[in-house]
Image (spheres, rainbow, N blue to C red):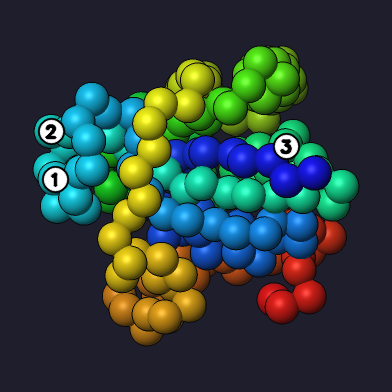
Amino acid sequence: MIETATLGGGCFWCLEAVYLDVAGVTSVESGYAGGPGRNPTYEQVCSGQTGHAEVVKIAFDTDRISFRDILQIFFAIHDPTTLNRQGNDVGTQYRSVIFTHDDAQQAIAQALIDDLERQRVFDDPIVTVVAPVPEYFPGEAYHQNYFARNPFQGYCMMVVGPKVAKFRKQFAHFLSGAA
């Protein structure tokens, strides 16, 4: 069965690049969600004035990977303890957020956060927001598959590439054959 996850963990290029490598993921789309306006542009979202977060919409086959596994990868590839910040990316558009598509996803996300907190996986408390998915808006075409198309762009070399490498090393068992 194909299910959808919508996640924000800083720049969407990082999340997209990682999830495109995951076995069982059928598609990943970079976009925006969480703000009141309709059809925001990248420039508007980057201003921090729209209330939208950069997110990825992930379609995945639950016969091959679970929502909990999708989230375990999510928590490993970004810092869920920094409010409205990932590295040098600062603002609400870079917040850590799990937009859930149903009550089951809500329960799984909250249970995983509770488990991570109980295990003290992070030195600081998790600030990831778990909320029902709001209206989602696809990002511009030039943001889709960004890392694969721009591997030598500065941000990709300094930020995206190392996150992808960390994922591939830590989660080799989740890699698709294309990696």
Residue 80 visible in the picture: yes
Residue extending farthest bottom = 152
Question: What's the CA distance linking mark 2 and mark 1?
Answer: 7 Å
Of 145 and 122, the residue lying toward us:
145
Q: Is residue 19 above or below residue 47?
A: below
Residue extending farthest right = 63
Residue that label 3 marks = 67
Label 2 close to label 1 by CB (< 8 Å): yes
Nearer-N-terminus badge (3/2): 2
Label 3 close to label 2 by CB (< 8 Å): no
In this picture, residue 65 sits left or right of residue 148: right
For the residue marked with disc 2, what is the amino acid?
Gln
Q: Residues within 10 Å of mark 2 (few under 14, many from 20)?
A: few
Question: What's the CA distance linking mark 3 and mark 2?
Answer: 31 Å
Residue that label 2 marks = 49
Q: In the structure shown, which secondary structural element does the residue marked by tag 1 occupy?
A: helix
Nearer-N-terminus badge (1/3): 1
Q: Residue at x 32, y 78 (%)?
A: 153
Q: In the structure shown, which secondary structural element does the residue marked by tag 2 occupy?
A: loop
Q: Is residue 66 above or below residue 29?
A: above
Nearer-N-terminus badge (2/1): 1
For the residue marked with disc 1, what is the amino acid?
Gln
Q: Is residue 44 above or below residue 22?
A: above
Residue that label 1 marks = 44
